């Protein structure tokens, strides 16, 4: 008879903001902060995606480290002494929010980010340059909205380049690889090959990119059109959980309904089956309900 | 993988042939993406949708990702571009030699940079370029010629007339040379890293052997890997790429790592503005680098090595290609090296115009066919490096030191230089200096001494400032010239040796203009991955423009800009992923701290 493998959970002791914290080995500093009840702002992090640690808003100060470290991806180590509210941490978090706020349209961003910006007293307007012209004028990522299909729109003026959509389109969920980061530096952007329209690309319209987008840069066309018409009103929306009727997988879908019409479909990130991801049928195949 | 290719885009026969030749008979794996893109670019002058389709189909890469990689590099065009592109350096060293005026003249003659040059029927364009690593012969240029057997060629010093000819006909009249003043008669007998420069035919393995070549490898093979490692550790050699990490410690970590295979990488992506030392070694003594890499591989258990050279070094690339082929033919690369049963071979890979790829983890990603974005550290390369395996990665100059360490022994090497900085150091001296060039001195010389070695400030002018360590380094005032050029000596005064750049600016240079060029360099070279660097570098550049404009117009309101610049410096240094963002404010900060702001008030022509 084969020996039954025993699994050991080893624990790591560290100090966060003066508190002793014990977490299982492999726990990230972000998770350790959560377990200690310390709120940490995140932007590019999502439970259902591999951490890319690019936004740097979750940075913390680890004693002995030359630079701040991204808590979302740094594993806790024995004896670490971590500060999450030091002057350096507050400065970096504030500046990251200010830099994003100064270059990206955050008008449809998840309110939680706006609350975090306020918490860190970020004033993106500090970088406004009024009527400055030429090289001294403030650059932004402002660009025309891309509407090339009936299901969703891409407004990269609202893109914070968190890489979430690329991850969801790639190995973290869909394995379609229709989009990637293209270009470099401030002009880096999310793009299909040669910026070809979505209908000519590998896109399968699963909408999982919309599901993870934190700023509304990717949006249901139904939502976009209602916002344009001034009729989008989340206070009048009800969210109903149900099971997708199409196949036997049993994905939970959340129907966002306004004025008796489905205006958006999501899935809970903590749902065992979907982890927040759906396919084209679950995400967009709801029109038949409205054929009255 | 079920690839969705670009509908209707078909490669031309020529593109297909070039791409297939680059991929060769090897297994069509993703790490061949960069060589395949190079082949397409060199054939057609741009990466066409058809060419990308063919590459992606051969290598099983999604076209969106292939496009993401192609559009990352400055030497690749993803929109149709004229087959001939003249890259004109307008970076800091070349600015002291009139590069800006040359660019304005080119614009007047041929139209804006990046557009089809007028009067040549769509055959050519010219673009502004960051530092081309030919600072000692500034101003510099690079002719990139697609569909042309002559390939790419570097030019320096290039006059306006030379550049006009290059745009119009593709002829690179002012071919670059190598400038190492200490090798002029009377030759400095103390040269070590440069001992063969000018004496040995860089294209002949026999000539290299006649000058003592391959004795160090033979000695290492006879000593065995353990003793070789010990010599390196005892030599106290510190990495010359900028971070000064102990080479022996790095090598031991890889050698002892049970995970296999191990890889060895030579970082020859020398792109720090003002730096040209590695270029000189590769052009004039390429076998020395190959021998040193072989020693490193033997000591650390690597059977496969990659030499990643920046794309703007065509002469060094050709010489290394020849040298690797000769070493292979002689049985000194490949299986059973020198009949000792040791296996090691080197693949030469060209970068394609991206400063960030000199950052070691970006370099790995670039080699693997990904965008050249840095990885988060830890894990460090000795544990998780190229292809996720334990990897030795060292700079060219670091490798070059190996030969002396093996020949004379680690402890002897450690006894040279200073206590904290063993050996000799290469310095790239350029700008407003009498004899610009590459210099080698034992560690411990002062900055003043090295400047004196190069004949002091040119034209008898007064020295305004020295940029030490490159664009990621710091400015030094004329009062600080007595600092010893050692790792510990520069650290003590919050400076850095960086990549060994010593760039002089005399009293005629507009320092504000130089600072803005440095800021625009980092903005242009930021990979865009993390927020502090992607947006911080552009905000820094904008604020510097406003600051300099305000000073020039005698306006107030500069305190606001200084506050913004300082705030940006702190977030870039603290929260950027890699060294690029962490040092993008370094030179600007040092200048703002050390030089009165009104230095920027009265720009004068550098000529």
Image (cartoon, rainbow, N blue to C red):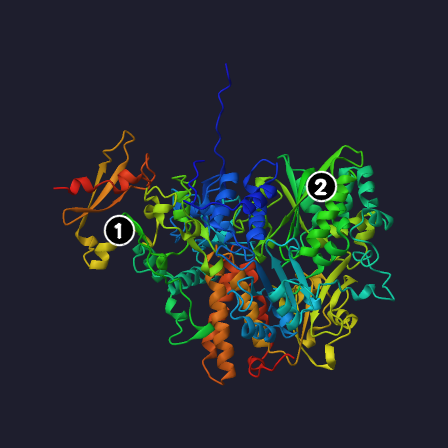
Dot 1 corresponds to which residue? A221
Compared to residue B509, the image places residue B115 above or below, namely above
Q: Nearer the viewer, mark 1 or mark 2?
A: 1
Dot 2 corresponds to which residue? B297
- Relative to B246, is A210 on the left or the right? left
Q: Which image quarter is the C terminus of chain B in?
A: bottom right
Percent position (x, y) of residue B198?
A: 81, 59
| Element class at badge 1 | helix
* Callout 1–callout 2 Cβ contact below 8 Å: no
| Element class at badge 2 | helix
Residue most toward the bottom? B554
- Relative to B356, is A246 on the left or the right? left
Tell me the residue at 37%/69% (across/down).
A125
Tell me the residue at 59%/71% (across/down).
B590
Residue most toward the left? A292
Residue B95 visible in the displayed image: yes
Q: Which image quarter is the N terminus of chain B in?
A: top left
Question: In which image quadrant can residue B230 be found?
Answer: top right
The one of B80 and B492 positioned closer to us in this rendering: B80
Residue A89 visible in the displayed image: no
Compared to residue A20, the image places residue B182 above or below, namely below
Percent position (x, y) of residue B314?
A: 67, 56
The one of A202 and B235 positioned closer to us in this rendering: A202
The one of B481 and B440 positioned closer to us in this rendering: B440
Alpha-carbon span between mark 1 and mark 2 = 56 Å
- Relative to B238, is B148 on the left or the right? left
Q: How busy is the neighbourhood of tag 1: few (under 14 within 10 Å), some, or many (20 plus)?
A: some
Report in which chain the residue with disc 2 lies: B
């Amino acid at each position: 008879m084969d020996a039954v493998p025993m699994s050991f959970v080893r624990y790591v002791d560290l100090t966060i903001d003066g508190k002793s914290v014990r977490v299982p080995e492999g726990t990230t500093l972000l998770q350790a902060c959560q377990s200690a009840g310390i709120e940490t702002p995140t932007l590019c992090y999502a439970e259902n995606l591999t951490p890319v640690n690019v936004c740097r808003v979750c940075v913390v100060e680890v004693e002995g480290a030359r630079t701040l470290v991204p808590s979302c991806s740094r594993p806790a180590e024995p004896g670490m002494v971590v500060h999450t509210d030091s002057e350096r941490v507050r400065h970096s978090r504030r500046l990251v929010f200010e830099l994003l706020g100064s270059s990206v349209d955050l008008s449809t961003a998840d309110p939680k980010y706006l609350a975090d910006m306020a918490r860190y007293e970020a004033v993106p307007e500090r970088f406004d340059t009024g009527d400055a012209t030429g090289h001294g004028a403030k650059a932004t990522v402002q660009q025309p909205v891309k509407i090339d299909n009936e299901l969703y729109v891409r407004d990269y003026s609202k893109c914070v380049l968190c890489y979430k959509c690329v991850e969801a389109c790639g190995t973290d969920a869909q394995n379609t690889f229709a989009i990637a980061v293209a270009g470099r530096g401030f002009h880096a952007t999310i793009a299909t090959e040669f910026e070809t329209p979505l209908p000519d690309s590998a896109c399968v319209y699963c909408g999982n990119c919309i599901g993870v987008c934190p700023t509304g840069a990717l949006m249901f066309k139904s939502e976009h059109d209602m916002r344009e018409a001034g009729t989008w009103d989340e206070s009048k929306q009800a969210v109903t959980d149900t099971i997708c009727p199409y196949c036997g997988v049993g994905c939970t879908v959340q129907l966002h309904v306004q004025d008796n019409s489905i205006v958006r479909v999501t899935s809970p990130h903590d749902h065992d089956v979907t982890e927040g991801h759906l396919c084209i049928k679950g995400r967009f195949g709801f029109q038949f309900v409205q054929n009255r | 993988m079920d690839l969705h290719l670009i509908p209707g885009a078909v490669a031309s026969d020529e593109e297909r042939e070039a791409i297939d030749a680059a991929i060769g008979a090897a297994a069509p794996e993703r790490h061949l993406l960069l060589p395949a893109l190079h082949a397409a670019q060199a054939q057609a002058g741009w990466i066409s949708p058809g060419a990308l389709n063919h590459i992606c189909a051969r290598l099983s890469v999604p076209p969106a990702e292939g496009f993401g990689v192609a559009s990352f590099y400055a030497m690749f065009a993803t929109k149709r571009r004229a087959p001939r592109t003249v890259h004109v350096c307008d970076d800091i060293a070349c600015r002291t030699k009139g590069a800006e005026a040359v660019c304005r003249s080119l614009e007047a003659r041929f139209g804006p940079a990046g557009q089809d040059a007028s009067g040549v029927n769509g055959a050519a364009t010219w673009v502004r370029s960051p530092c081309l690593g030919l600072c000692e012969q500034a101003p510099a240029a690079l002719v990139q010629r697609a569909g042309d057997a002559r390939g790419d060629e570097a030019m320096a010093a290039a006059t306006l007339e030379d550049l006009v000819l290059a745009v119009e006909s593709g002829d690179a009249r002012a071919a670059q040379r190598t400038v190492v003043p200490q090798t002029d008669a009377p030759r400095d007998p103390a040269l070590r890293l440069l001992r063969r420069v000018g004496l040995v035919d860089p294209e002949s393995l026999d000539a290299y052997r006649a000058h003592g070549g391959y004795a160090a490898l033979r000695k290492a093979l006879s000593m065995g890997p353990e003793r070789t490692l010990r010599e390196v550790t005892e030599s106290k050699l510190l990495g010359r790429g900028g971070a000064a990490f102990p080479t022996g410690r790095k090598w031991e970590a890889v050698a002892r790592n049970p995970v296999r295979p191990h890889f060895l990488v030579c970082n020859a992506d020398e792109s720090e503005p003002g730096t040209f030392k590695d270029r000189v070694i590769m052009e004039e003594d390429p076998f020395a680098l190959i021998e040193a890499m072989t020693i490193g591989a033997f000591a650390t258990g690597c059977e496969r090595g990659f030499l990643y050279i920046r794309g703007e070094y065509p002469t060094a690339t050709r010489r290394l290609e020849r040298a690797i082929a000769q070493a292979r033919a002689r049985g000194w690369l490949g299986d059973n090296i020198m009949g000792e049963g040791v296996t090691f071979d080197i693949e030469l890979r060209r970068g394609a115009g991206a400063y960030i790829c000199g950052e070691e983890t970006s370099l790995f990603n670039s080699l693997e066919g990904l965008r050249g974005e840095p990885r988060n550290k830890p894990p460090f390369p000795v544990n998780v490096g190229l292809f996720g395996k334990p990897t030795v990665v060292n700079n060219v100059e670091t490798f070059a030191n190996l030969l002396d360490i093996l020949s004379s022994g680690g402890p002897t090497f450690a006894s040279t230089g200073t206590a904290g900085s063993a050996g000799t150091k290469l310095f790239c001296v350029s700008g407003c200096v009498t004899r610009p060039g590459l210099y080698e001195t034992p560690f411990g010389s002062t900055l003043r001494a090295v400047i004196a070695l190069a004949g002091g400030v040119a034209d008898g002018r007064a020295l305004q400032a020295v940029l030490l360590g490159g664009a990621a380094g710091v400015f030094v005032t004329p009062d600080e010239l007595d600092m010893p050029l050692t790792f510990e000596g520069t650290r003590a005064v919050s400076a850095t040796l960086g990549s060994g750049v010593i760039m002089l600016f005399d009293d005629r240079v507009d320092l504000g203009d130089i600072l803005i060029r440095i800021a625009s360099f980092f903005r242009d070279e930021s990979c865009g991955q993390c927020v502090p660097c992607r947006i911080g570098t552009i905000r820094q550049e904008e604020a510097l423009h406003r600051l300099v404009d305000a000073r020039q117009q005698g306006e107030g309101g500069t305190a606001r800009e200084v506050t913004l610049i300082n705030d940006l410096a702190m977030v870039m240094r603290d929260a950027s992923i890699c060294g690029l963002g962490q040092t993008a404010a370094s030179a600007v900060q040092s200048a703002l701290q050390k030089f009165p702001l009104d230095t920027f008030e009265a720009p004068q022509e550098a000529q």
